[in-house]
Image (cartoon, rainbow, N blue to C red):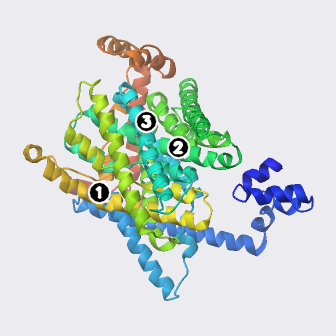
Amino acid sequence: PGDQLAFKSNDTEPYSNETLHSTTPAVKPTTPAPPTPKPILPVQTGVKAQEEEQSSGLTIFFSLLVIGICIILVHLLIKFKLHFLPESVAVVSLGILMGGFIKIIEFQELANWKEEEMFRPNMFFLLLLPPIIFESGYSLHKGNFFQNIGSITLFAVIGTAISAFIVGGGIYFLGQADVIYKMSMTDSFAFGSLISAVDPVATIAIFNALNVDPVLNMLVFGESILNDAVSIVLTNTAEGFFSRSDNSMVTGWETFVQALGYFLKMFFGSAALGTLTGLISALFLKHFDLRKTPSLEFGMMIIFAYLPYGLAEGLKLSGIMSILFAGIVMSHYTHHNLSPVTQILMQQTLRTVAFMCETCVFAFLGLSIFSFPHKFELSFVIWCIVLVLLGRAVNIFPLTILLNFFRDHKITPKMMFIMWFSGLRGAIPYALSLHLGLEPIEKRQLIGTTTIIIVLFTILLMGGGTMPLIRIMDIEESQSRRKNKKDVNLSKTEKMGNTIESEHLSELTEEEYEAHIYQRQDLKGFMWLDAKYLNPFFTRRLTQEDLLHGRIQMKTLTNKWYEEVRQGPSGSEDEEDEAELL
Protein backbone atom coordinates (compact mmCIF):
# COMPACT_ATOMS: atom_id res chain seq x y z
CA PRO A 1 0.00 0.00 0.00
CA GLY A 2 2.88 2.40 0.75
CA ASP A 3 4.28 1.96 -2.77
CA GLN A 4 0.83 2.30 -4.26
CA LEU A 5 0.31 5.53 -2.32
CA ALA A 6 3.64 6.98 -3.40
CA PHE A 7 2.94 6.10 -7.02
CA LYS A 8 -0.60 7.49 -7.02
CA SER A 9 0.16 10.81 -5.42
CA ASN A 10 3.71 11.56 -6.49
CA ASP A 11 3.02 15.28 -6.71
CA THR A 12 2.07 15.54 -3.03
CA GLU A 13 4.83 13.16 -1.90
CA PRO A 14 5.97 14.95 1.29
CA TYR A 15 2.42 15.29 2.61
CA SER A 16 1.47 11.68 1.99
CA ASN A 17 4.65 10.47 3.69
CA GLU A 18 3.97 12.64 6.75
CA THR A 19 0.47 11.23 7.12
CA LEU A 20 1.84 7.74 6.70
CA HIS A 21 4.28 8.12 9.61
CA SER A 22 2.26 10.28 12.01
CA THR A 23 -1.09 8.56 12.44
CA THR A 24 -2.50 5.28 11.34
CA PRO A 25 -6.17 6.38 10.94
CA ALA A 26 -5.10 9.09 8.52
CA VAL A 27 -3.87 6.44 6.12
CA LYS A 28 -7.33 4.93 5.59
CA PRO A 29 -8.89 7.80 3.62
CA THR A 30 -5.78 8.26 1.48
CA THR A 31 -5.54 4.57 0.53
CA PRO A 32 -9.05 3.64 -0.56
CA ALA A 33 -10.10 0.16 -1.61
CA PRO A 34 -9.47 -0.65 -5.30
CA PRO A 35 -11.80 1.64 -7.27
CA THR A 36 -13.10 -1.02 -9.67
CA PRO A 37 -15.94 -2.51 -7.58
CA LYS A 38 -17.41 0.89 -6.69
CA PRO A 39 -18.94 2.00 -10.01
CA ILE A 40 -20.43 -1.42 -10.81
CA LEU A 41 -23.69 -1.00 -8.82
CA PRO A 42 -24.62 2.58 -9.84
CA VAL A 43 -23.69 1.95 -13.47
CA GLN A 44 -25.66 -1.28 -13.74
CA THR A 45 -28.94 -0.19 -12.19
CA GLY A 46 -31.43 2.59 -11.71
CA VAL A 47 -31.57 6.17 -12.93
CA LYS A 48 -27.79 6.61 -13.18
CA ALA A 49 -27.57 3.73 -15.65
CA GLN A 50 -30.20 5.34 -17.87
CA GLU A 51 -28.45 8.71 -17.71
CA GLU A 52 -25.12 7.09 -18.60
CA GLU A 53 -26.71 5.24 -21.54
CA GLN A 54 -28.33 8.44 -22.81
CA SER A 55 -25.03 10.34 -22.51
CA SER A 56 -23.06 7.57 -24.28
CA GLY A 57 -25.77 7.33 -26.96
CA LEU A 58 -25.56 11.06 -27.61
CA THR A 59 -21.76 10.92 -27.77
CA ILE A 60 -21.91 8.07 -30.33
CA PHE A 61 -24.57 9.93 -32.34
CA PHE A 62 -22.52 13.14 -32.28
CA SER A 63 -19.29 11.33 -33.36
CA LEU A 64 -21.08 9.52 -36.23
CA LEU A 65 -22.73 12.76 -37.34
CA VAL A 66 -19.32 14.48 -37.44
CA ILE A 67 -17.75 11.59 -39.43
CA GLY A 68 -20.75 11.55 -41.82
CA ILE A 69 -20.40 15.27 -42.57
CA CYS A 70 -16.62 14.81 -43.07
CA ILE A 71 -17.18 11.90 -45.52
CA ILE A 72 -19.48 14.16 -47.59
CA LEU A 73 -16.77 16.85 -47.50
CA VAL A 74 -14.05 14.43 -48.68
CA HIS A 75 -16.39 13.21 -51.47
CA LEU A 76 -16.91 16.82 -52.62
CA LEU A 77 -13.13 17.41 -52.60
CA ILE A 78 -12.64 14.38 -54.87
CA LYS A 79 -15.65 15.21 -57.06
CA PHE A 80 -14.56 18.79 -57.74
CA LYS A 81 -10.92 17.67 -58.16
CA LEU A 82 -9.56 19.88 -55.35
CA HIS A 83 -6.42 17.72 -55.26
CA PHE A 84 -4.18 20.51 -53.98
CA LEU A 85 -5.95 20.47 -50.58
CA PRO A 86 -4.93 17.68 -48.16
CA GLU A 87 -7.98 16.06 -46.56
CA SER A 88 -6.66 16.66 -43.05
CA VAL A 89 -6.67 20.44 -43.73
CA ALA A 90 -10.28 20.33 -44.97
CA VAL A 91 -11.51 18.14 -42.08
CA VAL A 92 -9.78 20.24 -39.39
CA SER A 93 -11.25 23.42 -40.95
CA LEU A 94 -14.72 21.83 -40.90
CA GLY A 95 -14.19 20.84 -37.25
CA ILE A 96 -13.34 24.47 -36.38
CA LEU A 97 -16.51 25.69 -38.13
CA MET A 98 -18.64 23.08 -36.34
CA GLY A 99 -17.04 23.99 -33.01
CA GLY A 100 -17.90 27.65 -33.58
CA PHE A 101 -21.49 26.74 -34.52
CA ILE A 102 -21.89 24.60 -31.34
CA LYS A 103 -20.45 27.43 -29.25
CA ILE A 104 -23.09 29.82 -30.68
CA ILE A 105 -25.85 27.26 -29.88
CA GLU A 106 -24.54 26.92 -26.31
CA PHE A 107 -24.20 30.70 -25.94
CA GLN A 108 -27.84 31.13 -26.99
CA GLU A 109 -28.70 28.38 -24.45
CA LEU A 110 -30.49 26.31 -27.10
CA ALA A 111 -28.59 23.13 -26.19
CA ASN A 112 -25.63 21.92 -24.14
CA TRP A 113 -23.32 19.55 -26.03
CA LYS A 114 -20.30 20.17 -23.81
CA GLU A 115 -19.80 16.52 -22.90
CA GLU A 116 -20.39 15.15 -26.40
CA GLU A 117 -17.84 17.41 -28.12
CA MET A 118 -15.09 16.78 -25.57
CA PHE A 119 -12.40 14.45 -26.89
CA ARG A 120 -11.58 11.58 -24.53
CA PRO A 121 -7.94 10.42 -24.70
CA ASN A 122 -8.89 6.87 -23.57
CA MET A 123 -11.28 6.57 -26.53
CA PHE A 124 -8.44 7.64 -28.83
CA PHE A 125 -5.89 5.14 -27.49
CA LEU A 126 -8.29 2.20 -27.23
CA LEU A 127 -10.54 2.65 -30.27
CA LEU A 128 -9.23 5.17 -32.80
CA LEU A 129 -5.44 4.78 -32.85
CA PRO A 130 -5.04 0.95 -33.14
CA PRO A 131 -6.85 0.69 -36.55
CA ILE A 132 -4.85 3.64 -37.95
CA ILE A 133 -1.49 2.14 -36.86
CA PHE A 134 -2.39 -1.45 -37.85
CA GLU A 135 -3.55 -0.35 -41.30
CA SER A 136 -0.34 1.61 -41.88
CA GLY A 137 1.70 -1.46 -40.91
CA TYR A 138 -0.49 -3.73 -43.05
CA SER A 139 0.03 -1.53 -46.12
CA LEU A 140 3.84 -1.80 -45.71
CA HIS A 141 4.05 -5.08 -47.63
CA LYS A 142 6.48 -3.72 -50.24
CA GLY A 143 9.86 -5.42 -50.32
CA ASN A 144 11.61 -2.04 -50.15
CA PHE A 145 10.71 -1.76 -46.47
CA PHE A 146 12.77 -4.81 -45.44
CA GLN A 147 15.63 -3.86 -47.76
CA ASN A 148 15.84 -0.39 -46.17
CA ILE A 149 15.06 -1.38 -42.59
CA GLY A 150 18.41 0.07 -41.38
CA SER A 151 17.87 3.53 -42.88
CA ILE A 152 14.22 3.61 -41.79
CA THR A 153 15.11 2.65 -38.20
CA LEU A 154 17.87 5.29 -38.14
CA PHE A 155 15.41 7.99 -39.23
CA ALA A 156 12.60 6.78 -36.98
CA VAL A 157 14.47 6.10 -33.74
CA ILE A 158 17.58 8.33 -33.83
CA GLY A 159 15.82 11.13 -35.77
CA THR A 160 12.79 11.23 -33.46
CA ALA A 161 15.05 11.13 -30.37
CA ILE A 162 17.16 14.05 -31.77
CA SER A 163 14.00 16.06 -32.40
CA ALA A 164 12.62 15.23 -28.92
CA PHE A 165 15.90 16.22 -27.21
CA ILE A 166 16.16 19.53 -29.09
CA VAL A 167 12.55 20.56 -28.39
CA GLY A 168 12.59 19.26 -24.78
CA GLY A 169 16.05 20.66 -23.97
CA GLY A 170 15.21 24.00 -25.58
CA ILE A 171 12.00 24.38 -23.54
CA TYR A 172 13.78 23.39 -20.30
CA PHE A 173 16.70 25.83 -20.70
CA LEU A 174 14.49 28.70 -21.94
CA GLY A 175 12.29 28.08 -18.88
CA GLN A 176 15.33 28.16 -16.58
CA ALA A 177 16.34 31.48 -18.17
CA ASP A 178 12.81 32.84 -17.45
CA VAL A 179 12.19 33.45 -21.16
CA ILE A 180 9.13 31.15 -21.22
CA TYR A 181 6.97 29.19 -18.74
CA LYS A 182 9.24 27.16 -16.43
CA MET A 183 8.93 23.36 -16.68
CA SER A 184 10.84 20.44 -15.18
CA MET A 185 13.23 18.34 -17.28
CA THR A 186 10.85 15.34 -17.46
CA ASP A 187 7.85 17.51 -18.47
CA SER A 188 9.93 19.26 -21.14
CA PHE A 189 11.17 15.95 -22.54
CA ALA A 190 7.63 14.47 -22.50
CA PHE A 191 6.39 17.47 -24.51
CA GLY A 192 9.39 17.25 -26.89
CA SER A 193 8.63 13.54 -27.47
CA LEU A 194 4.91 13.95 -28.14
CA ILE A 195 5.40 16.87 -30.55
CA SER A 196 7.95 14.86 -32.59
CA ALA A 197 5.27 12.54 -34.07
CA VAL A 198 5.04 13.49 -37.76
CA ASP A 199 2.13 12.93 -40.16
CA PRO A 200 3.61 12.76 -43.68
CA VAL A 201 0.49 12.20 -45.81
CA ALA A 202 1.20 15.33 -47.88
CA THR A 203 4.86 14.38 -48.45
CA ILE A 204 4.03 10.87 -49.64
CA ALA A 205 1.29 12.09 -51.98
CA ILE A 206 3.68 14.63 -53.53
CA PHE A 207 6.50 12.08 -53.83
CA ASN A 208 4.13 9.68 -55.62
CA ALA A 209 3.04 12.35 -58.08
CA LEU A 210 6.61 13.56 -58.74
CA ASN A 211 7.76 10.03 -59.70
CA VAL A 212 10.31 10.05 -56.89
CA ASP A 213 12.63 7.08 -56.51
CA PRO A 214 10.49 4.38 -54.79
CA VAL A 215 13.27 3.67 -52.27
CA LEU A 216 13.18 7.29 -51.08
CA ASN A 217 9.39 7.11 -50.98
CA MET A 218 9.64 4.02 -48.77
CA LEU A 219 12.20 5.74 -46.52
CA VAL A 220 9.78 8.58 -45.79
CA PHE A 221 6.74 6.31 -45.52
CA GLY A 222 8.47 3.76 -43.26
CA GLU A 223 10.03 6.49 -41.11
CA SER A 224 6.70 8.22 -40.59
CA ILE A 225 4.91 5.04 -39.51
CA LEU A 226 7.65 3.91 -37.10
CA ASN A 227 8.04 7.52 -35.93
CA ASP A 228 4.51 7.57 -34.48
CA ALA A 229 5.17 4.47 -32.39
CA VAL A 230 8.63 5.70 -31.30
CA SER A 231 7.17 9.06 -30.27
CA ILE A 232 4.51 7.34 -28.13
CA VAL A 233 7.13 5.08 -26.47
CA LEU A 234 9.42 8.10 -25.79
CA THR A 235 6.51 9.99 -24.19
CA ASN A 236 5.64 6.94 -22.06
CA THR A 237 9.33 6.71 -21.03
CA ALA A 238 9.33 10.35 -19.90
CA GLU A 239 6.03 9.83 -18.06
CA GLY A 240 7.22 6.56 -16.51
CA PHE A 241 10.28 8.30 -15.05
CA PHE A 242 8.28 11.30 -13.88
CA SER A 243 7.31 9.57 -10.62
CA ARG A 244 10.65 7.84 -10.07
CA SER A 245 12.99 10.77 -10.69
CA ASP A 246 11.43 12.73 -7.79
CA ASN A 247 11.88 10.20 -5.04
CA SER A 248 15.15 8.50 -6.01
CA MET A 249 18.37 10.42 -5.38
CA VAL A 250 20.32 9.47 -8.51
CA THR A 251 22.50 11.55 -10.81
CA GLY A 252 21.30 12.83 -14.16
CA TRP A 253 23.58 10.35 -15.99
CA GLU A 254 22.15 7.36 -14.09
CA THR A 255 18.61 8.55 -14.77
CA PHE A 256 19.45 8.83 -18.49
CA VAL A 257 20.86 5.27 -18.57
CA GLN A 258 17.77 3.95 -16.73
CA ALA A 259 15.46 5.82 -19.12
CA LEU A 260 17.37 4.42 -22.13
CA GLY A 261 17.01 0.89 -20.73
CA TYR A 262 13.30 1.45 -20.16
CA PHE A 263 12.88 2.78 -23.73
CA LEU A 264 14.77 -0.17 -25.27
CA LYS A 265 12.70 -2.64 -23.20
CA MET A 266 9.47 -0.96 -24.36
CA PHE A 267 10.61 -0.73 -28.00
CA PHE A 268 12.08 -4.21 -28.52
CA GLY A 269 9.70 -5.99 -26.11
CA SER A 270 6.63 -4.58 -27.87
CA ALA A 271 8.10 -5.19 -31.35
CA ALA A 272 8.94 -8.82 -30.43
CA LEU A 273 5.41 -9.39 -29.01
CA GLY A 274 3.79 -7.99 -32.18
CA THR A 275 6.08 -10.02 -34.45
CA LEU A 276 5.37 -13.21 -32.48
CA THR A 277 1.59 -12.65 -32.69
CA GLY A 278 1.88 -12.09 -36.46
CA LEU A 279 3.91 -15.30 -36.93
CA ILE A 280 1.46 -17.33 -34.80
CA SER A 281 -1.45 -15.98 -36.91
CA ALA A 282 0.41 -17.04 -40.09
CA LEU A 283 0.98 -20.59 -38.80
CA PHE A 284 -2.59 -20.85 -37.49
CA LEU A 285 -4.16 -19.86 -40.82
CA LYS A 286 -1.69 -22.04 -42.72
CA HIS A 287 -2.67 -25.21 -40.85
CA PHE A 288 -6.35 -24.39 -40.10
CA ASP A 289 -7.86 -24.08 -43.55
CA LEU A 290 -10.70 -21.57 -43.11
CA ARG A 291 -10.70 -20.47 -46.75
CA LYS A 292 -14.02 -22.16 -47.54
CA THR A 293 -15.74 -19.98 -44.87
CA PRO A 294 -14.50 -16.40 -45.46
CA SER A 295 -16.54 -14.98 -42.56
CA LEU A 296 -14.71 -17.17 -40.01
CA GLU A 297 -11.39 -16.45 -41.68
CA PHE A 298 -12.01 -12.68 -41.59
CA GLY A 299 -13.11 -12.97 -37.93
CA MET A 300 -9.81 -14.65 -36.99
CA MET A 301 -7.85 -11.93 -38.80
CA ILE A 302 -9.65 -9.18 -36.83
CA ILE A 303 -8.96 -11.03 -33.55
CA PHE A 304 -5.25 -11.46 -34.34
CA ALA A 305 -5.07 -7.79 -35.39
CA TYR A 306 -6.25 -6.45 -32.01
CA LEU A 307 -4.78 -9.23 -29.81
CA PRO A 308 -1.22 -7.83 -29.48
CA TYR A 309 -2.54 -4.41 -28.44
CA GLY A 310 -4.44 -5.74 -25.44
CA LEU A 311 -1.67 -8.17 -24.44
CA ALA A 312 1.10 -5.52 -24.67
CA GLU A 313 -0.88 -2.98 -22.63
CA GLY A 314 -1.56 -5.70 -20.03
CA LEU A 315 2.19 -6.47 -19.80
CA LYS A 316 2.96 -2.69 -19.46
CA LEU A 317 4.57 -2.55 -22.91
CA SER A 318 3.56 -0.32 -25.83
CA GLY A 319 0.37 -1.58 -27.51
CA ILE A 320 0.91 0.74 -30.49
CA MET A 321 4.40 -0.58 -31.21
CA SER A 322 3.23 -4.21 -30.99
CA ILE A 323 0.16 -3.67 -33.21
CA LEU A 324 2.38 -1.95 -35.82
CA PHE A 325 4.78 -4.89 -36.02
CA ALA A 326 1.88 -7.36 -36.00
CA GLY A 327 0.46 -5.48 -39.02
CA ILE A 328 3.78 -5.61 -40.89
CA VAL A 329 4.29 -9.36 -40.22
CA MET A 330 0.65 -10.28 -40.95
CA SER A 331 0.72 -8.50 -44.30
CA HIS A 332 4.00 -10.21 -45.20
CA TYR A 333 3.03 -13.79 -44.23
CA THR A 334 -0.55 -14.28 -42.97
CA HIS A 335 -2.13 -12.37 -45.86
CA HIS A 336 -0.97 -15.00 -48.34
CA ASN A 337 -2.71 -17.76 -46.37
CA LEU A 338 -6.12 -16.15 -46.89
CA SER A 339 -8.69 -16.79 -49.60
CA PRO A 340 -8.85 -14.11 -52.36
CA VAL A 341 -12.22 -12.88 -51.01
CA THR A 342 -10.82 -12.30 -47.50
CA GLN A 343 -7.69 -10.66 -48.94
CA ILE A 344 -9.79 -8.00 -50.68
CA LEU A 345 -12.20 -7.75 -47.74
CA MET A 346 -9.32 -7.26 -45.29
CA GLN A 347 -7.73 -4.46 -47.34
CA GLN A 348 -10.96 -2.57 -47.89
CA THR A 349 -12.20 -2.96 -44.29
CA LEU A 350 -8.90 -1.78 -42.81
CA ARG A 351 -8.78 1.22 -45.13
CA THR A 352 -12.36 2.21 -44.37
CA VAL A 353 -11.97 1.88 -40.58
CA ALA A 354 -8.60 3.70 -40.59
CA PHE A 355 -10.08 6.51 -42.72
CA MET A 356 -13.05 6.91 -40.35
CA CYS A 357 -10.81 6.92 -37.27
CA GLU A 358 -8.41 9.49 -38.79
CA THR A 359 -11.31 11.69 -39.89
CA CYS A 360 -12.86 11.50 -36.42
CA VAL A 361 -9.58 12.57 -34.77
CA PHE A 362 -8.98 15.49 -37.15
CA ALA A 363 -12.58 16.70 -36.78
CA PHE A 364 -12.35 16.61 -32.97
CA LEU A 365 -9.01 18.40 -33.23
CA GLY A 366 -10.85 21.29 -34.93
CA LEU A 367 -13.68 21.12 -32.39
CA SER A 368 -11.25 21.23 -29.46
CA ILE A 369 -10.45 24.89 -30.17
CA PHE A 370 -13.81 25.74 -28.61
CA SER A 371 -14.39 22.78 -26.25
CA PHE A 372 -11.01 22.73 -24.47
CA PRO A 373 -10.16 25.01 -21.46
CA HIS A 374 -7.17 26.97 -22.82
CA LYS A 375 -4.11 28.65 -21.34
CA PHE A 376 -2.34 30.66 -24.02
CA GLU A 377 1.17 32.13 -23.72
CA LEU A 378 2.47 33.78 -26.89
CA SER A 379 6.20 33.49 -26.04
CA PHE A 380 5.83 29.76 -25.23
CA VAL A 381 3.96 29.05 -28.49
CA ILE A 382 6.43 31.00 -30.69
CA TRP A 383 9.51 29.39 -29.11
CA CYS A 384 7.92 25.93 -29.38
CA ILE A 385 7.22 26.41 -33.12
CA VAL A 386 10.84 27.59 -33.66
CA LEU A 387 12.21 24.59 -31.72
CA VAL A 388 9.92 22.14 -33.58
CA LEU A 389 11.15 23.41 -36.98
CA LEU A 390 14.78 23.41 -35.76
CA GLY A 391 14.41 19.88 -34.33
CA ARG A 392 13.00 18.62 -37.64
CA ALA A 393 15.88 20.27 -39.55
CA VAL A 394 18.58 18.76 -37.27
CA ASN A 395 16.81 15.41 -37.65
CA ILE A 396 16.49 15.47 -41.48
CA PHE A 397 19.59 17.20 -42.90
CA PRO A 398 22.50 15.56 -41.00
CA LEU A 399 20.93 12.08 -41.16
CA THR A 400 20.23 12.26 -44.92
CA ILE A 401 23.79 13.52 -45.59
CA LEU A 402 25.10 10.60 -43.49
CA LEU A 403 22.85 8.10 -45.33
CA ASN A 404 23.95 9.40 -48.75
CA PHE A 405 27.44 7.98 -48.09
CA PHE A 406 25.96 4.46 -48.01
CA ARG A 407 23.30 4.82 -50.71
CA ASP A 408 23.25 4.33 -54.48
CA HIS A 409 20.15 6.52 -54.83
CA LYS A 410 21.21 9.85 -53.36
CA ILE A 411 18.68 12.07 -51.58
CA THR A 412 18.91 15.46 -53.28
CA PRO A 413 18.93 18.76 -51.30
CA LYS A 414 15.55 19.56 -52.91
CA MET A 415 14.07 16.34 -51.51
CA MET A 416 15.63 17.05 -48.10
CA PHE A 417 13.94 20.44 -48.06
CA ILE A 418 10.55 18.94 -49.01
CA MET A 419 10.98 16.30 -46.28
CA TRP A 420 11.76 19.04 -43.73
CA PHE A 421 8.96 21.36 -44.82
CA SER A 422 6.27 18.70 -44.89
CA GLY A 423 6.87 17.50 -41.32
CA LEU A 424 3.22 18.05 -40.44
CA ARG A 425 2.02 17.25 -36.94
CA GLY A 426 -1.18 15.24 -36.86
CA ALA A 427 -3.54 13.49 -34.51
CA ILE A 428 -1.04 11.72 -32.26
CA PRO A 429 0.60 14.77 -30.59
CA TYR A 430 -2.87 16.16 -29.84
CA ALA A 431 -4.12 12.96 -28.14
CA LEU A 432 -0.83 12.47 -26.26
CA SER A 433 -1.01 16.03 -24.92
CA LEU A 434 -4.45 15.29 -23.42
CA HIS A 435 -3.13 12.03 -21.98
CA LEU A 436 -0.21 13.59 -20.05
CA GLY A 437 -0.92 13.56 -16.32
CA LEU A 438 0.70 16.92 -15.53
CA GLU A 439 0.14 18.94 -12.38
CA PRO A 440 -0.85 21.70 -11.74
CA ILE A 441 -3.85 21.88 -14.09
CA GLU A 442 -2.64 25.11 -15.74
CA LYS A 443 0.51 23.33 -16.98
CA ARG A 444 -1.65 20.66 -18.62
CA GLN A 445 -3.84 23.34 -20.22
CA LEU A 446 -0.76 25.23 -21.47
CA ILE A 447 0.72 22.11 -23.11
CA GLY A 448 -2.69 21.14 -24.56
CA THR A 449 -3.25 24.60 -26.04
CA THR A 450 0.31 24.85 -27.41
CA THR A 451 0.04 21.39 -29.02
CA ILE A 452 -3.28 22.29 -30.69
CA ILE A 453 -1.75 25.53 -32.06
CA ILE A 454 1.39 23.73 -33.38
CA VAL A 455 -0.71 20.97 -35.01
CA LEU A 456 -3.04 23.54 -36.63
CA PHE A 457 -0.06 25.70 -37.68
CA THR A 458 1.68 22.80 -39.42
CA ILE A 459 -1.51 21.35 -40.96
CA LEU A 460 -3.07 24.60 -42.20
CA LEU A 461 0.02 26.65 -43.10
CA MET A 462 2.67 24.06 -44.01
CA GLY A 463 0.19 21.47 -45.33
CA GLY A 464 -1.61 24.09 -47.38
CA GLY A 465 1.71 25.62 -48.50
CA THR A 466 3.39 22.39 -49.67
CA MET A 467 1.71 22.58 -53.07
CA PRO A 468 2.80 26.15 -53.97
CA LEU A 469 6.30 25.28 -52.71
CA ILE A 470 6.50 22.35 -55.16
CA ARG A 471 5.39 24.62 -58.01
CA ILE A 472 8.16 27.12 -57.14
CA MET A 473 10.85 24.48 -56.63
CA ASP A 474 10.55 22.31 -59.75
CA ILE A 475 9.46 24.13 -62.88
CA GLU A 476 11.09 21.66 -65.29
CA GLU A 477 9.54 18.62 -63.60
CA SER A 478 6.07 20.14 -63.54
CA GLN A 479 6.37 20.80 -67.32
CA SER A 480 7.27 17.15 -67.96
CA ARG A 481 4.39 16.14 -65.69
CA ARG A 482 1.96 18.20 -67.79
CA LYS A 483 3.16 16.31 -70.86
CA ASN A 484 2.48 13.02 -69.08
CA LYS A 485 -0.84 14.47 -67.84
CA LYS A 486 0.16 13.47 -64.30
CA ASP A 487 -1.23 15.79 -61.66
CA VAL A 488 -0.18 16.10 -58.03
CA ASN A 489 -3.00 14.58 -56.00
CA LEU A 490 -3.06 15.12 -52.22
CA SER A 491 -6.26 13.09 -51.70
CA LYS A 492 -5.28 10.01 -49.68
CA THR A 493 -8.78 8.49 -49.91
CA GLU A 494 -8.98 8.71 -53.71
CA LYS A 495 -5.57 7.05 -54.04
CA MET A 496 -6.59 4.24 -51.70
CA GLY A 497 -10.01 3.78 -53.28
CA ASN A 498 -8.57 3.35 -56.76
CA THR A 499 -6.26 0.48 -55.90
CA ILE A 500 -6.41 -3.03 -54.65
CA GLU A 501 -2.80 -4.04 -54.12
CA SER A 502 -2.17 -6.56 -56.90
CA GLU A 503 1.02 -7.69 -55.17
CA HIS A 504 -1.12 -8.81 -52.26
CA LEU A 505 -3.32 -10.91 -54.53
CA SER A 506 -0.52 -12.70 -56.37
CA GLU A 507 -0.68 -16.43 -55.78
CA LEU A 508 2.17 -18.65 -56.89
CA THR A 509 2.19 -22.43 -56.85
CA GLU A 510 5.12 -24.17 -55.17
CA GLU A 511 6.93 -24.80 -58.49
CA GLU A 512 6.41 -21.18 -59.62
CA TYR A 513 7.70 -19.87 -56.25
CA GLU A 514 10.88 -21.99 -56.49
CA ALA A 515 11.49 -20.72 -60.03
CA HIS A 516 10.82 -17.14 -58.84
CA ILE A 517 13.53 -17.43 -56.12
CA TYR A 518 16.15 -18.84 -58.49
CA GLN A 519 15.52 -15.93 -60.88
CA ARG A 520 16.17 -13.42 -58.06
CA GLN A 521 19.95 -13.81 -57.65
CA ASP A 522 20.27 -10.27 -56.20
CA LEU A 523 18.65 -11.12 -52.85
CA LYS A 524 20.94 -10.55 -49.85
CA GLY A 525 20.78 -10.79 -46.06
CA PHE A 526 17.30 -10.93 -44.56
CA MET A 527 15.60 -10.87 -47.98
CA TRP A 528 17.45 -14.05 -49.01
CA LEU A 529 16.72 -15.75 -45.66
CA ASP A 530 13.07 -14.74 -45.94
CA ALA A 531 12.65 -16.01 -49.51
CA LYS A 532 14.54 -19.26 -48.92
CA TYR A 533 13.29 -20.38 -45.48
CA LEU A 534 10.81 -18.06 -43.67
CA ASN A 535 8.31 -17.56 -46.50
CA PRO A 536 7.91 -21.28 -47.31
CA PHE A 537 7.60 -22.08 -43.55
CA PHE A 538 4.97 -19.44 -42.68
CA THR A 539 2.93 -19.29 -45.89
CA ARG A 540 0.86 -21.93 -47.63
CA ARG A 541 2.24 -22.87 -51.04
CA LEU A 542 -0.66 -23.45 -53.37
CA THR A 543 -1.21 -26.38 -55.71
CA GLN A 544 -2.86 -25.84 -59.11
CA GLU A 545 -6.05 -27.31 -57.59
CA ASP A 546 -6.04 -24.70 -54.75
CA LEU A 547 -5.52 -21.93 -57.27
CA LEU A 548 -8.43 -23.16 -59.40
CA HIS A 549 -10.67 -23.47 -56.32
CA GLY A 550 -9.80 -19.88 -55.29
CA ARG A 551 -10.74 -18.57 -58.74
CA ILE A 552 -14.02 -20.53 -58.79
CA GLN A 553 -14.93 -19.31 -55.28
CA MET A 554 -14.18 -15.72 -56.32
CA LYS A 555 -16.24 -16.05 -59.50
CA THR A 556 -19.17 -17.76 -57.70
CA LEU A 557 -19.36 -15.15 -54.96
CA THR A 558 -19.02 -12.25 -57.41
CA ASN A 559 -21.80 -13.68 -59.60
CA LYS A 560 -24.00 -14.27 -56.55
CA TRP A 561 -23.54 -10.69 -55.30
CA TYR A 562 -24.11 -9.36 -58.80
CA GLU A 563 -27.37 -11.35 -59.09
CA GLU A 564 -28.55 -9.89 -55.77
CA VAL A 565 -27.69 -6.37 -56.89
CA ARG A 566 -29.48 -6.91 -60.21
CA GLN A 567 -32.73 -7.88 -58.48
CA GLY A 568 -35.21 -5.04 -58.94
CA PRO A 569 -37.48 -3.75 -56.16
CA SER A 570 -40.17 -6.24 -57.20
CA GLY A 571 -37.75 -9.13 -56.80
CA SER A 572 -37.57 -9.92 -60.55
CA GLU A 573 -34.54 -9.18 -62.66
CA ASP A 574 -34.76 -5.99 -64.63
CA GLU A 575 -33.57 -7.53 -67.89
CA GLU A 576 -35.31 -4.96 -70.07
CA ASP A 577 -33.58 -2.10 -68.20
CA GLU A 578 -30.26 -3.87 -68.51
CA ALA A 579 -30.70 -4.42 -72.26
CA GLU A 580 -31.64 -0.76 -72.65
CA LEU A 581 -28.54 0.32 -70.68
CA LEU A 582 -26.30 -1.93 -72.79
545 shown above or below 395: above
The residue lying furthest to the bottom in this view is 108
Which one is nearer the viewer's eye here, 519 or 506?
Answer: 519
Kindly identify the amino acid type of the residue bearing the numbered disc 1: Met
Report x, y in % for residue 190: 53, 50
Is residue 346 something one can see in this rendering?
A: no
**Residue beneath disc 2:** 234
Please name the residue that numbered disc 1 is placed on.
462
Residue type, mark 3 in image: Ile
Q: Provide residue 166's location: percent of width, then percent of height.
A: 42, 46
Judge by depth and name the residue closer to the eye, 199 or 88. Answer: 199
Is residue 500 left or right of 279 when viewed as pictured?
left
What is the C-alpha distance between the residues marked 2 and 3?
11 Å
Q: Is residue 253 above or below residue 382?
A: above
Who is closer to the viewer here, 204 or 7?
Answer: 7
Neighbor class of circle 2 (other Cα within 10 Å; few <14, some 14-19, many 20+) is: many
Relative placement, left or right, of 174 versus 299 is left
Mark 2 element type: helix
- Badge 1 density bin: few <14, some 14–19, many ≥20, Cα 10 Å: some
What residue would you read off at disc 3?
A: 158
Across and down, in percent, residue 321 comes to 53, 39
Horizontal side, residue 140 vs residue 204: left or right: right
Label 3 CA crowd tier, 10 Å (few <14, some 14–19, many 20+): some
Amino acid found under the numbered disc labelled 2: Leu
